[in-house]
Image (spheres, rainbow, N blue to C red):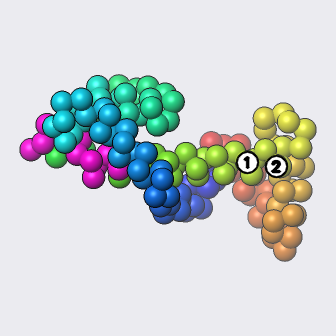
Amino acid sequence: MFFSQAGARPRMWEASPSEHKKWVEVFKACDEENKGCLSRENFKVAVVMLFGYKPSKIEADAVMSSVDPNTSGILLKEFLDIVRKKKEAQLYWNEIRHIFTAFDRHYRGYLTLEDFKKAFKQVAPKLSERIILEVFSAQEVQ
């Protein structure tokens, strides 16, 4: 993808105090036994509560493998970090989707070379057509 190749990364994002409070409340609600950590299943419930989807086995495995093996689950600090990263990624992809939609003037779900040229003319008018063609061509290969 062009954005990742160009080095674009989600910006560091901080939760508002009310959002942070909500995350802590969800953690506490899902920590049914008040152990101070979430089991794999409790983590899945928390993700459903915050993001509206059940994490896949692969996602849950990745999270659980990153947890300190000396604990019996995901601690609050780890949970808050995971949720912040998920929120950052969600905002990043929403931003990309919004930008794409702005340039997809005919609502086709893809950009033609002409759409691409018009988009770059608006955001980088001094960029040479050769560079634009190279970027567009590189996307076709992927």
| Residue in the image at 27% along x and 47% along y | 76
Q: Can the viewer see residue 58 in this picture?
A: no
Q: Nearer the viewer, residue 28 or 62?
A: 28
| Amino acid type for the residue under numbered disc 2 | Ala
**Spatial distance from mark 1 to mark 2, Cα to Cα?**
6 Å
Is the residue under label 2 in contact with that under label 1 (CB below 8 Å)? Answer: yes
- The numbered dot on residue 98 is 1
In percent of width and height, residue 63 lies at 30, 39
Residue located at (32% from left, 34% from top):
29
Q: Quadrant of residue 23?
A: top left
User: How many residues crowd mark 2 within 10 Å: few (<14), some (14–19), many (20+)?
Assistant: few
Image location of residue 22, percent across then percent down: 43, 45
Question: Please, what secondary structure does the residue beneath circle 2 have?
Answer: helix
The span shown in magenta is 70-80
- The quarter of the image holding the C terminus is top right
Q: Where does residue 107 sit, x and y in percent of width and height?
A: 85, 36
66 or 119: nearer the eye? 66
Whether residue 14 appears in magenta in the rendering, the answer is no
* Residue occupying the point 35% across, 46% down: 24
Is residue 31 in view?
yes
* Residue farthest bottom in this picture: 126
**Residue at x 84% of width, y 33% of height:** 108
Mark linked to residue 102: 2
